[in-house]
Image: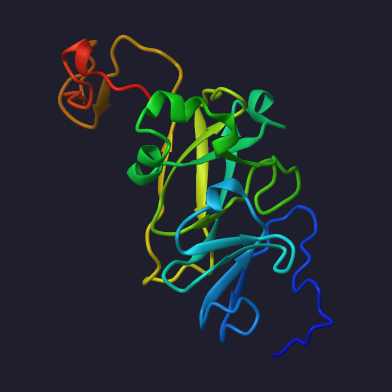
Amino acid sequence: MTFDSSVKRLINYAYPYKAIILDEDGSITGKGPHSWATPYYKHHEHPECEHNETYYGGTICDNRVQVRRVAIGGAKPASVLSMQGLKVLRYDDEYIEEAGGNKTEYLLNKSAYGTINWKEKSDPGNGWAPSLVTGKKYKIHFGQTGIDFEQMSFYMSERWEEWDHPIYLVHNWTDVRQAIDVEVGTGMSSSGTKGFYLVPNDTIAANKEDWRLG
């Protein structure tokens, strides 16, 4: 596929701005075979990608990465989470260092987040469908400050290939508890109920000074 100088813009995305294009020969993106194009969001700003709104209509990425859809739905309580935006932050160490190395300040910088609008219609209904660059880590939360949720389902793209790079998601859990106990299938529960045993919680540091927020 070739384009002459009369073409001023190659791609023009429309609402809800979630399309992902695989350019098999690189003739659209100019970034070689198996490159990618998708609408721009702040969390797409990676070394393998370029933001060019004027000509390409959004983000283009080379074949060192993939761009894949991750659908999120089944959120409970639905009455609290519906209509809320999904906030997505690049969360690899290199981006925190580029921002000065202060994680707290980085997390509080609202301009560093991409925002995915909640959608009512199907696939999934009442959820979110961000496009994410693979091989990266992202911090996600719902609403402005991180709404707690009781249940959430994540769906991989049906086009996901076994050689795709992984995607790492870090999310908030804002409901505070002094202790979190997990009880499973056999033995006796902490309340004396037969058929359960308590799994020791070794995920939280014993010393409060060692706790890490965010």
Image mark count: 0
On screen, residue 119 above or below 201: below
Q: Is residue 192 visible?
A: no
Q: Position of residue 35 (x, y in %)?
A: 53, 75
Q: Residue furthest bottom?
A: 1
The image's colour scheme reads rainbow
Q: Identify which residue, 55 or 195, lies in the foreground.
A: 55
Question: Quarter holding the C terminus?
Answer: top left
Residue 142 placed where, x, y %? 58, 31
Residue 125 x, y percent position in the rendering: 69, 46
| Residue 180 versus residue 21 in the image, above or below | above
Q: Is residue 15 left or right of residue 22?
A: right
Q: Which of the 4 image quadrants contains residue 52?
A: bottom right
Q: Residue at x 67, y 31 (%)?
A: 84
Check the image and report above or below for 117 versus 52.
Answer: above
Asked whether the viewer can see residue 8, the reply is: yes
Work out which quarter of the rendered image holds the N terminus and state it: bottom right
The quarter of the picture where residue 169 lies is top left
The one nearer the camera, 34 or 59, is: 59
- Residue drawn 33% across and 42% down? 93
Residue visible at 52% across and 63% down in the picture = 49
Give the residue drawn at x 54%, y 48%. 43
Q: Residue furthest right?
A: 6
Left or right: where 65 falls relative to 196? right
Horizontal side of residue 18 vs 192, given as left or right: right
